[in-house]
Image (cartoon, rainbow, N blue to C red):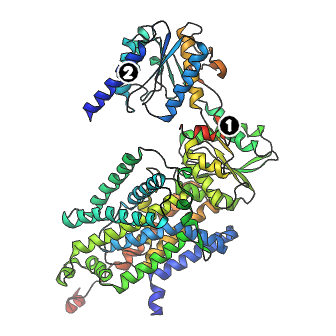
Amino acid sequence: MSVMKKVLSTVAVAATFMAGTAQADDVRIALVVKALGIGFFEAAAKGAEEAAAELGGVQIIYTGPTDTTAEGQIEVINSLIAQQVDAIAVSANDTDALVPALKKAMSRGITVISWDSGVAPEGRSLHLNPSSNALIGNMIVKLAADHLPDGGDVAVLSATTTSTNQNIWIEEMNKVLGNYPGIKVVGTVYGDDLADKSYREANGLMQTYPNLKAIIAPTSVGIVAAAQAVADAGKIGEVNVTGLGLPSEMAGAIESGASKSFAIWNPIDLGYSATMLAYNLSQGNATAEPGAEIPMGRMGNLTLDDNNEGAMADPFVYDASNIEQFKSIF
Amino acid sequence: MIKRFVASREAILLVAILALLVLVASRCPGFVAPANLANVFNDTAPLIILALGQMVVIVTRCIDLSVAANLALTGMVVAMINTVAPGLPVFVILAVALMLGAALGAVNGLLVWKLDIPPIVVTLGTMTIFRGVIFLISDGKWINAHEMSAHFTAFPRMQLLGLPVLSWIAIAMVVLFFVLITRTALGRAFFAVGGNPHAAVYTGIDVGRTQFFAFVLSGALAGITGYLWVARYAVAYVDIAGGFELEVVAACVIGGVSIAGGIGSVGGALLGALFLGVVKNALPVVNISPFWQLAISGSAIIIAVAMNARASRRKGRVILKQAEHLA
């Protein structure tokens, strides 16, 4: 097993080497992902290539370990340092473990940023979050409101009562409820991220609130279960299920009409933005410091906070028009 | 006969369930509408099926903690079979689920029978192994609604005389187990083994073999439920039915099945499962804080166990009449 792993990562490293020697004059940006072969990151690489084509004279080195380990990423990063790439954009398997290797890279003049999954501040110049809690909280209620021009009762189906992410998003959602007149949140229930409990809770919501117009589920298990419950109850068209989910898991619900739309980050945009940021920093077009605004092409500007972190954009909305394209990606 | 029934656990449970329904109806009248009660029964069907198998295992002084993992593994396997061979008819899928589930149950049974390892250890181990295997075969990925064929997900929902097939399967299993327990030699052997293993050996019953069959039965039921579960929720992934094994054990305990073995009935398991099913379905409707829901389910279990303990406590037998006067 360990020998096999070694061989595989050596192959991966060798592959990066060969890719790296192609054109020496280009700006070479390495997109280091958690592991190769994951649809989400393949899509991010597509976005990176799009950015490279737009910028011109940029070569993308898409690489990563064969399994999601920090050790594998360190090996990859060391080989990238040896190749003297211009920038490394990494989605980290561990917040702290990569810091020494990335520090070494920065000390050799390589621009280092993290995206998607961040590293500790001392190991990168900035971190790109796919979105922010405030943007997500706003998006989940907007998704419900968009299909309710006359307003109506909506309910939230969350994960567990103690899920930090969901609780923050719901809190942020409640803050902006005033912007959506007519939308009344009648209750919040918890499906514990179990398919059967979420299904039951969704049924309970439909019984308790006969006028329910939408169920907002900011969790991937809950949204799928709620869509199934609505379909089984024969309430498609009456109750719209929305929230955060993955296109591959929600394709059936979009097809059946139980869900009109839902949101999650767009990996293509994420890879595109990470590349743009890495390029601009490595070319000296911008510096990463608190409060700085760094351009990222068609995605606008990234505003950095005190930790040199920024949020890319609103979560991307998926519906019948684009689900076919994304359901095979992630 | 009637007197015995009134004092029995089944009667107490039936009253408790009815009282619960009245209580819920006072806050939400729609809950006791026949259509909704049918929904509640349908939702509880998987729990009923698994509780029947678990009851047999517990009666033989064993416990099967791997049922939920068995369910998840079988469910994943049939879902994967469905993705590669979407045209396969449902009865083939059911047969595969039944056999795979029974085979997984047989692994538990063999370890308990041949290696004499305590059942709780064996099934705790296989529980983790089964979940691990799901991860290995699925690569941690989900199988989603749109990847399953229409007839695969439609089967448990098909209406037959007003009830979905899922409910009918649960009813059929209850009848089947009632006959098995009360009318066959194997059924009586389960009780003999659990009631007094030494005496069972003297009557020519192989204790280990009987326990083995209990595990195979429990596994087979878990297998069938695996398919039904995956088809009903139209999704298969590593963690489906996580923690469900405890609910199954709880249903048995509430139904008066003694953890010490030898005592239990099909009616008890059925009513125990129904009780939990009503609680689980009623709590979201009556708007009780989710923080309380767990506490309420937990209290029901402890009350039931306390009642079991009281019921099975033996009255002291006076062996020295004269000494009693002196004391």
The answer to which image quadrant residue B20 occupies is bottom right
Left or right? Give the position of A182 relative to A316.
right
Query: Between tags 2 and 1, which lies in front?
Result: 2
| Residue B217 seen in the figure | yes
Chain designation of label 2: A
Q: Position of residue B301 (x, y in %)?
A: 45, 67
- Residue at (19%, 85%) from the top-left corner? B203
Q: Quadrant of residue A280?
A: top right
For the residue carrying disc 2, how many other residues have a C-alpha within 10 Å: few (<14), some (14-19), or many (20+)? Answer: few
The quadrant the N terminus of chain A occupies is: top left
Task: Say which of B266 and B104 sits in front.
Answer: B104
Q: Amino acid at mark 2?
A: Ala
Up/down of A106 relative to A202, above or below? above
Q: Are marks 2 and 1 in contact (CB under 8 Å)?
A: no
Residue A178 - label: none
Callout 1 secondary element: helix
State how far apart marks 2 and 1 are (Cα).
Answer: 41 Å
At which x and y percent is residue B306? 41, 71
Mark 1 Cα shell of 10 Å, populated few (<14), some (14-19), many (≥20): many
Q: Is residue B259 left or right of residue B116?
A: right
Residue that appears at 38% across and 72% down: B55
Left or right: residue B58 versus residue A233 is left
- In the picture of the structure, the residue carrying the numbered disc 1 is A139
Where is B227 relative to B53, above or below? Answer: above
The vertical placement of B238 against A326, above or below, is: below
x 58%, y 21%: residue: A50
Left or right position of B66 against A188: left
Q: Which residue is mark 2?
A: A15
Q: Residue furthest left?
A: B202
Q: Identify which amino acid the numbered label 1 is placed on.
A: Met
Give the letter of the chain under mark 1: A
